[in-house]
Amino acid sequence: MTETYTPSQPTWCAGCGHYGVQGALTGALSKLDVPAYETMLLAGIGCSGSVQNNIEAYGYHAMHGRVLPTAVGAAVANPDLTVIAAGGDGDGYAIGAGHLVHALKRNASVLYILMNNGTYGLTKGQDSPTAEGPLEAPIDGILLGLAISGSTFLARASTRFATQLDDLMVQALEHVRAKRGFAFLEVLSPCVTYNDTYPDWDARLFNLEDVPEFDCTDRASAFAAVQRLKDRNRIPAGLCFQAEWPAFEERWIEQGLKPADLARHDPAIHGDRFRDLMSSYLV
């Protein structure tokens, strides 16, 4: 018998949006009947990074900003897993921004839940890359994703509007489990302690699904629609874009490649070369 880890209770502040994200994720896993032993949840650093402690699944706490390459590695190594990465806007849009760009481009079957609160809550309230202020323009993850041709699923939800968040979480998981590639779900998850944006974001949220003519399969028109709303100081939400493009791990399988082909690290393969190299440093 193996010993099963018992999920812990969240340590977030009362009113934190992350409770809603966790509830939507556990609800989606249950609705789609995804067993814990087939689920891999990886998390980054920050308040959001503790979510992997609270859910019954295989869990891994990645280095700061490195959750996505780790998650992509898991998806390639075992395509049978449902791989989920979770992190905050600091982890994903600052130190991890380069990895986000490449994850969107590669299109591995990973669900990335980015909890956006516009602040570094764990380190006591510094501005994050999505903070709005007079000195810098905030990063918009949806526009970023739309600008990268390999992206296949881009959505934004708010913890205030639970029904839409629940629906998008299910759709994102379905996208990943069908091996259609990378699903990016940004969730507006306010920090009530250092950056309580509930009133502001509630007033500015605009549901793209309420626009009959909006086509989430047309990248150019989706980009234009999101940009127009931002120019009006609105926050686009809903399923912003979905497309078909071969998943990264499927392309590996088609070419007959295995994960070990990325880097042959078995010492037996290069043992003689290593010994020759080391001997060259001996006096």
Image (tube, rainbow, N blue to C red):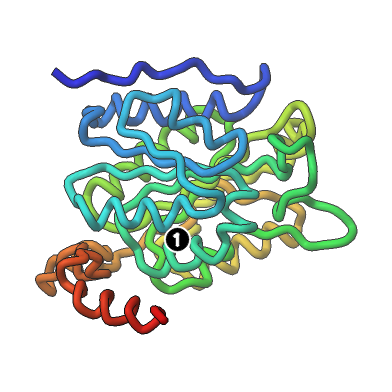
Of all residues shown, which one is farthest toward the front?
A: 283
Q: 152 or 269, which lies in front? A: 269
Where is residue 195 shown, x and y percent of the image? Answer: 78, 35
Q: Quadrant of the N terminus?
A: top left
Where is residue 33 shown, x and y percent of the image? Answer: 22, 28
Where is residue 246 shown, x and y percent of the image? Answer: 25, 67
**Which residue is at 29% across, 49% downward?**
176
Label 1 sits on residue? 215
> How many other residues sit within 10 Å of disc 1, few (<14), some (14-19) or many (≥20)?
some
Is 168 situated above or below 244? above
**Which residue is at 73% across, 38% downward?**
123
**Which residue is at 20% across, 64% downward?**
266
**Which residue is at 68% across, 40% downward?**
117
Q: 31 or 104, which lies in front? A: 104
Q: 261 or 75, which lies in front? A: 261
Where is residue 108 shown, x and y percent of the image? Answer: 31, 60
Residue 117 falls left or right of residue 43: right
Residue 229 falls left or right of residue 176: right
Q: Secondary structure at mark 1?
A: loop
User: Quadrant of residue 96 in the image?
Assistant: bottom right
Amino acid type, label 1: Asp
